[in-house]
Each structure stands twice: as structure tokens, then as C-alpha cells.
Amino acid sequence: MVEEIFQTDPISALGLPPPVCIGQTSSVGEALAAVQEHGVGYVLIVDDLGRPVGLMSEREVLMKIVARDVKYAENVDVYMTHHPETLTLKEPIALAIQLMNEGGERNIPIVDDSGQAVAVLRTLDIIHFLAEAFPAQVMNLPPRPHQLIPEPEGA
């Protein structure tokens, strides 16, 4: 049952909001302001046609900008993840989960048939989907006090 939902339900079933985008000539300061204003943990960098060319997440901000001598007027191009892997709204949720799991992606730009950004799928969106699709199973999961997390969650 669980596998069937992921294999058959397209990403469009998640009802993702429009992405938070800035242009590729934007500054680091503009990227930080967009993340702060919208509170989504990422900003998608798009070209003049609205196609994704990069992505800056909280992780990039923490790892590449915080506690470094970065000028906020510098171009965001220096600090973003270039050419992020994209998916379409038609592709199954299972493919997105696989990409997140195998590639370590936390934010995946979702594009339409012309390549324009229409959303960004976040790990949190998958968690919300699971909680809504399987509320009893999620709420009744036993605690695992000795569970080891391979990578700390957060930014």
C-alpha cells in the first residue's frame, strides 16, 4: 500500500506552493533577505526565463557565509549550488524520495514542461505527506532512544 502511493502519486499531489526565487544577478544580501522574508529555508536562483540555475539553502548559508568575511553585495552565484537536479510535477513522489535519499538532496526544484520553476520540493513536504497519508502509523511509532542519526538534522 505504502509503495503504491509513492509509485503512483505524482509530485503534483503534494500541492506545493510557488517557489521563492531571485535572479542569477542577485546579491548574497538579496538571497538572505528572500530566505528570511519567506521563511522557507531556501531560495531558488533562476535565469531570465524562470529556469533554475542554482539553489541556496540554509545549509549553504551556514557552511559558506556565516562566520566568514562575505560581502553581502557579492553575487549569489559564488555561494549557490549550481545546476540542481530538477523533477516535474508528473513524476512520482517515489522518484523524489529516491533522489533525496541517494543524492542527499533536501530541496528539489520542480519545473514545468518548458523548464520553468513552479515549486521546490523540500524534505519537510515529504514528511508532511507521510503524516497526512498515514496518521495512525506516524503517531504510533515507538520511540527509538538508541537510534543513531548519520547526519544531524537542521539547516
Image (cartoon, grey):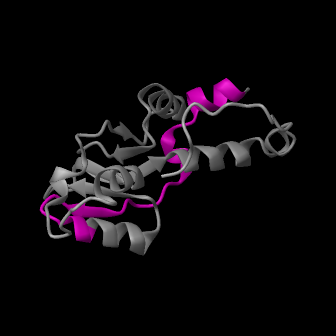
Q: Where is residue 147 in the image (x, y as percent from the top left)?
A: 73, 31
* In-front residue for pair 5/122: 122
* In-front residue for pair 124/8: 124
Report the residue at 83% width, 46% height from top: 139
Horizontal side of 35 relative to 123 (left or right) equals left
* In-front residue for pair 102/10: 102
Horizontal side of 84 relative to 133 (left or right) equals left
Horizontal side of 137 relative to 32 (left or right) equals right
- Queried whether the magenta region covers residue 150, the answer comes back as no
- Queried whether the magenta region covers residue 11, the answer comes back as yes
Magenta segment, which residues?
2-30
Q: Where is residue 60 in the image (x, y as percent from the top left)?
A: 34, 50
Q: Total label count?
A: 0
Q: Quadrant of residue 18?
A: bottom left
Report the residue at 70% width, 28% height from top: 2
Horizontal side of 131 relative to 141 (left or right) equals left
* In-front residue for pair 95/37: 37
Quadrant for the N terminus, please. Answer: top right
**Does residue 22 lie above or below 101 as drawn?**
below
Q: Where is residue 34 in the image (x, y as percent from the top left)?
A: 34, 70
**Does residue 154 lie above or below 152 as drawn?**
below
Q: In which quarter of the image is residue 143?
A: top right
**Does residue 115 lie above or below 71 as drawn?**
above
Q: Where is residue 150 in the image (x, y as percent from the top left)?
A: 57, 30
Report the residue at 30% width, 55% height from top: 44
